[in-house]
Amino acid sequence: MTQDQQVHVIIDNRERKLMELLDKRKDKISYESKQLDVADIVISENTAIERKTGADFIGSIMDNRLFEQLIRLQDVYKNAILILEGLNDDVFESTGMNINAIYGVLAKVSYVLGVAVIPTRNLEDTVIVIERIAYREQVKKGSSVMSRSAPKGMSKKERRSFIIEGLIDSGPKKAKILIDRFKTPYKVIEAIKNTEILYTRTGNPKGINGPLKKLQGFGWKFVQKNKEILFGKTSTQKTLDDL
Amino acid sequence: MTQDQQVHVIIDNRERKLMELLDKRKDKISYESKQLDVADIVISENTAIERKTGADFIGSIMDNRLFEQLIRLQDVYKNAILILEGLNDDVFESTGMNINAIYGVLAKVSYVLGVAVIPTRNLEDTVIVIERIAYREQVKKGSSVMSRSAPKGMSKKERRSFIIEGLIDSGPKKAKILIDRFKTPYKVIEAIKNTEILYTRTGNPKGINGPLKKLQGFGWKFVQKNKEILFGKTSTQKTLDDL
DNA sequence: CTGTAATCTTTATGA
DNA sequence: TCATAAAGATTACAG
C-alpha cells in the first residue's frame, strides 16, 4: 500500500526551523504559514498542537503561562496536543526547578487537563508526529481498525464485523462491507454458500454469480477459499457437467 | 506545597523494584501489594497507572498487547495513565522498529484513545509521578483509595486456535469442543441455530434442546447470546407451541 | 503502529 | 468470449 496521500497543516510563522524541515518532505506534507495566536500547528478544525522544547516547557511553568496557553488551546480546539520536545536529563539538571514540581505539572496537564502529551527527542521527531497526526486526522478518519482482542466496548455491529473477520478469510475492510450488506454473520455465511463460481468453457474460473455478485472486491478466489473453510468443500470444479 | 498527609496506593506484586523505592519514602506514601490483572499501580477507584519501560513499550506494540491492555485499563478505570519510563535514544536505536510506527502509536494512545501519557527518565522519577498523582487524587480531591477486584478479561492464552473463537462467549476450550464435535464452522453455526432454548411455564429460560444439548458447558445463556449476535433478534420464545 | 510484500479483483487489450 | 496484462485495492507479515 502506498500511502502517498498528501496532508496539509498550518504552521505559525515563527516556527522557521520547523518549516525548513517540512520543506524536505514536500511529497508527504504541505503547509501554509500564518500568524497563529493560540497554537503552533493547526491540523484541522478540531485539532491543534502546541510545541514546546524542554526549556520552553520549564520556562512557561515558571512564569505561569503554560496553563493559560493550554486552556486556551483546548478552548478553541477540541483535540489539544502538547508536543514535548527534548525533555531530557540536561533540561532537568540545568534548571533550578524542583523535579517534583515538573512532574506535578506534567501530571496535571495530561490527566487533569486532558491534553494529549507526546514526547519527542528533537525537531525531526516532532515532524514525524505532526505528519502522523495529520495523516490520521485527514486521511484515515473513520477507518477504525480494531485490534483482535477487545471484545468489550464494541458495538454490536463492530462485534459482528469482528466475528466475520475471524470466521472467513478477510480483513476489516471486507468484513465491514459484508456486515453492512448482510447485517448478521449468519446471513453473510448464507450469502457465501449461495454464491457460485462461474467457469469458462475451458474450465477456468471466470467470475461469480449470486449474492456477492454486486459487491465490489469479491471474486472467485474469495468464494472458493471461504467455501473451503466454512463447509469443508474442496472441488467445486464442474467443468464438463455443464455441457 | 508540602504534603503532610500520607497517600496510599496498590502495587502489582511483580513490581519489586518499585516497591523497594517506595519503602524509602514510607513517610510520604504507603502501599499494599496485590496481584493486579489490569494495571500496575492503582491510585483510586477511578485512577490507575500502567507503567512501561521503553523496551516494554516497543515490545508490547510488536505483539499487539499494548492496545488490549490500555483499552482494558480504560474500561475499568476512568482515568487511565501510561507512564513511559526511559524512552530515550537507546530504545529508539536498539529496536528494529520504524520510528514512524513508534510515534504513530504514541499519537493514537494519547490523542485517540485518550490515555494520559507521562514520560519519565527512570524508576525514581516514576515514583515521583505516582506520588504526585496519588496526592492529587487522595488529598486534594478527597477521593478514597482502596481496591476493587478488577473484572477479568477472559483468559485467552494462545489466540491462535480456531475461528469459532470469534463467537461472543467462546474461548479456546469451548471452540475446541465445538469443532471436535461439528467439524466445520458452518456446522457449528447450524448447530447453534438449531438449538432451542427451553422455557418454564412462567417464561423463564430453563435449559436447551438440540445439538448442543449433550455437550458440557453450553447452556441457554450461550445459545441466547450467540443467536443474537449471529442471527439478529431471537424471538425464540416458544413456550406453548410445544405442548 | 508502519512499511513492504504478497494476494486478489477489476479493467483493459488483443487474439 | 476467452486469456493475459496492467492497474487498483486489500490483506498478511515483519520489525
Image: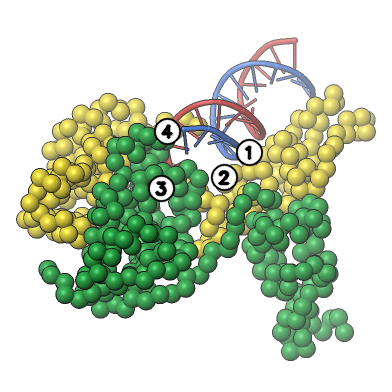
Chain colours: A yellow, B green, C red, D blue
Q: Which one is in front, B153 or A124?
A: B153
Q: Are marks 1 and 2 in contact (CB under 8 Å)?
A: yes
- Image coordinates of residue A200 in percent, x first then y, are 82, 27
State left or right for residue B142 relative to residue B243.
left
Q: Earlier in the sequence, mark 1 or mark 2?
A: 2
Picture mark count: 4
Nearest-to-viewer mark from 4 and 2: 4
Q: Earlier in the sequence, mark 3 or mark 4?
A: 3
Image quarter of the C terminus of chain B = bottom right
Q: Quadrant of residue A187?
A: bottom right
Mark 2 neighbour density, 10 Å: few (under 14) some (14–19) many (20 or more): some
**What separation in Å lies between label 3 and label 1 (alpha carbons)?**
39 Å
Chain of the residue under the numbered disc 1 shown in the image: A
Chain of the residue under the numbered disc 3 shown in the image: B
**Residue bearing mark 4:** B96
Chain of the residue under the numbered disc 2 shown in the image: A
Q: Are marks 4 and 2 in contact (CB under 8 Å)?
A: no
**Residue bearing mark 1:** A217
Q: Amino acid at mark 3?
A: Asp
Residue at mark 1 shares a chain with residue at mark 4: no
Residue at mark 2 shares a chain with residue at mark 3: no
Q: Amino acid at mark 2?
A: Lys
Q: Are marks 1 and 4 in contact (CB under 8 Å)?
A: no
Q: Amino acid at mark 4?
A: Gly
**Residue bearing mark 3:** B56
- Image coordinates of residue A12 in percent, x first then y, are 17, 41
Q: Secondary structure at mark 4?
A: loop
Q: Which one is in front, B151 or B29?
A: B29
State left or right for residue A104 relative to residue A156.
left
Height in image: A133 above or below B131? Answer: above
Q: Secondary structure at mark 2?
A: helix
**Residue bearing mark 2:** A173
